[in-house]
Image (cartoon, rainbow, N blue to C red):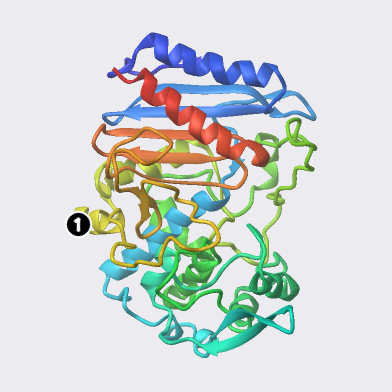
Amino acid sequence: MNERIQGQGGFSDHGLERLTRCIQTDIDKGMIPGASMLIAHRGKIVHESALGMQDPSTAVPMSKDTIFRIYSMTKPIVSVAIMMLVEQGRLLLSDPVSKFLPELGNLKVGVERTVNGKQVLELEPALQPITVQDLLRHTSGFTYGIFGDSLVKAEYRQAGIAHPRMSSDEFVKAMGQVPLMYQPGTVWEYSHSTDVLGVLLERVSGLTLDECLARCVLDPLDMRDTGFWVEESQHHRIAEGFNVDPVTGAEVRMNQPRRRPNLLGGGGGLMSTMRDYLQFAQMLANGGELGGTRLLSRKTLEWMTSDHLAGMPQARNGLSYLPGPGYGFGLGFAVRTEPGAAFIPGSVGDFTWSGLAGTYFWIDPREDLVGIFLMQAPEQRNHYRQLFRNLVYAALD
């Protein structure tokens, strides 16, 4: 299914056809089950397509209202909700997180040293508290138990951090008992920081995270199909992946979206659709407003999409700097700082993030452009993020 709405708006027919043909060819080869793509330019949808299969086990075709696990594309939504509290005077970015989550008030930093030829983990006091800003820009010192290995990450795995059967209180308590990977405010490290922000939202608002996000972001933007689980009546719309990735041979594992989890993961728990996420992304592209509804001020959004790693010489020296060359990191987004250096086209000031299962979006303010790509193929995510972006810019007149 392929559709262009309200004219091409600065895009070539040939380029958009090449985009569709390229992705469809890979689907026909069995490399990915299917994909949904959307391009908005100057506030209008210029390309929208739903290709391949929504569920390869049933051969149900992809549709424009298919529901996807968006994983870490949850993070920008939670970050916006946090900044709304900042605008309301209920938070400061300089606030220590322990002001709201006292379980995080006595953290230690894990330092690996070699003793008698063996790697051991020694604990040192944190030299400064984790701030709300640190959580937003991933300089808290927290990490994930996945994405590489270290003795600290092993501690996370052993503690079962962020298990879906945990409550939010149990999660924060567990986070207060594992060591930090780095001193707070020094190194960018992808982490459970936004999950912690989700609990902070609950504590400050007095609402559960689903209620808080609905009230702050989802309902005002009419994002009716976005939530932490999918009701039974809508299960037929859920996108699924292959059982085994055809390229890598790895077993495909994704979270279950069909019942409410105990832990509502602010860092990666949401389900959404292409049109719902466009509502959120277009609000950002418009400077914080959509259809007369303003969530954030223009200056707050400029603040969020500035590089908050500037002036931090060690920030990019972690095990894996996921924003990549040419990008810094703001308050919930990777932010382009250089016209070159990156291995993808774009503009200085564009901002972006993605999700583990293969979802991706970016906003290019200079070109007034929004791109959204959704699939459920975790092993292929890096390839298709780059491919989609290359083809979108190639189609721009």
Kindly identify the residue that appears in the image at 60 percent across and 63 percent down.
264
Could you tell me which residue is drawn at 35 percent across and 29 percent down? 40
Q: Quick one: quadrant of the C terminus? A: top left
Position in image of residue 110 (x %, y %):
59, 80
231 vs 252, left or right, is: left
Count neighbours of disc 1 (C-alpha within 10 A) and say few if under 14, some if 14 to 19, many if 20 or more.
Answer: few
Q: Is residue 1 visible?
A: no
Front residue of this view, candidates 3 and 338: 338
Q: What amino acid is at disc 1?
A: Lys
Q: Is residue 358 visible?
A: yes
Can you say whether 47 is above or below 366 in the image? above
Q: Against 337, is 84 above or below?
A: below
Q: Which residue is mark 1?
A: 299
Numbered disc 1: secondary structure: helix
Q: Residue at x 26, y 33 (%)?
A: 368
Residue 46 pos. (x, y %) = 36, 21
Residue found at x 27% / y 45%: 349
Looking at the image, residue 284 lies above or below residue 214: above
Res 176 quadrant in image: bottom right
Residue at far left of view: 299
Residue 80: horizontal and vertical position, in percent? Answer: 37, 58
Question: In the rendered view of the protein, which quadrant contains the N terminus?
Answer: top right
